[in-house]
Amino acid sequence: MNPPRGPLGVMGGTFDPVHLAHLRLAEEAAETLGLPEIRWVPAGNPGHRTAPRTPARHRLEMVRRAIAGNPRFSLDPAEAALDTPAFTIDTLTRIRGELGPDAPLVFLIGTDQLLAFETWRRWRELFLLAHFAVASRPGFALSIDSLPAALGREYADRAGPPECLARSRAGRIVNFPLTALEISGTEIRARLAAGRSVRYLLPPEVLAYIEANALYRPRA
């Protein structure tokens, strides 16, 4: 993959399935933070959570179809093929090796992920590899007091405006506002298992793929 002409955004997750809130987060991050490319990295066997129910090949293909019409989005299939657990430190180490030491790299997360950041493997080392952009819902003000003490100190030292992302390779934390879309993969899977509609929660291409492959039906 060719290096982007500016900070590279990275969107990781299980995407079980990918839905409109995922897509909107990536779109608003690209626009607000000035990211010319968002690289989507579907996890094969995520280290931070239980294994997804849906095989990685299906989740990878759903992401491929969901992002196909957006020239700023690209797909990274490397981790979908892994059987061993992959952690964020592994993802960022690999991508940093591809980009080189000086290119700005921005990992996109939600506020809930930041609150649990100290549980991530080798979390302090992550700041040596990438910036972190935190999507916040309108009206929600993230404060240092809401974070664990050690993480709060890191946040206070590293917080900055979107413009700082292009000026250095890694190490900053930037908040950006996100349009509130109350959509979750858990709810989508539950609706599908119950035979309820998920129209307008997913891109049409993803819904067509789910139906064609009989995904998320009740377990036999």
Image (spheres, rainbow, N blue to C red):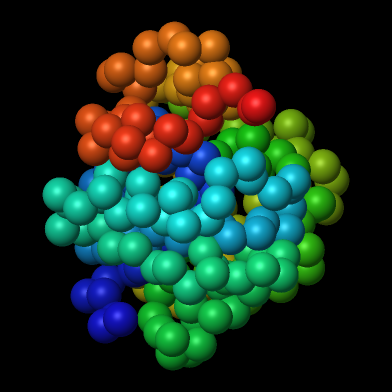
Q: Quadrant of residue 87?
A: bottom right
Q: For this rendering, which residue is in front, 195 or 138?
A: 195
Q: Quadrant of residue 154?
A: bottom right
Residue 33, x across and y down, in percent: 32, 52
Q: Quadrant of residue 163?
A: bottom left
- Which quadrant, please, contains the N terminus? bottom left
Residue depicted at x 65% and y 27%: 219
User: How many numbered discs, if any?
Assistant: 0
Residue depicted at x 36% and y 53%: 61
Q: For this rendering, which residue is in front, 84 or 109?
A: 84
**With respect to residue 4, does 21 lie above or below?**
above
212 left or right, relative to 141: left
Does residue 124 appear in this view? no
**With respect to residue 78, does 151 lie above or below?**
above
Residue 199, x across and y down, in percent: 30, 17
- Which quadrant, please, contains the C terminus? top right
**With respect to residue 134, does 159 lie above or below?**
below
Does residue 106 appear in this view? yes
Residue depicted at x 63% and y 41%: 53
Residue 176, x across and y down, in percent: 42, 40
Residue depicted at x 59% and y 79%: 93
102 left or right, relative to 159: left
Residue 82, x across and y down, in percent: 61, 70
Q: Residue furthest right?
A: 149
Q: For this rendering, which residue is in front, 87 or 207?
A: 207
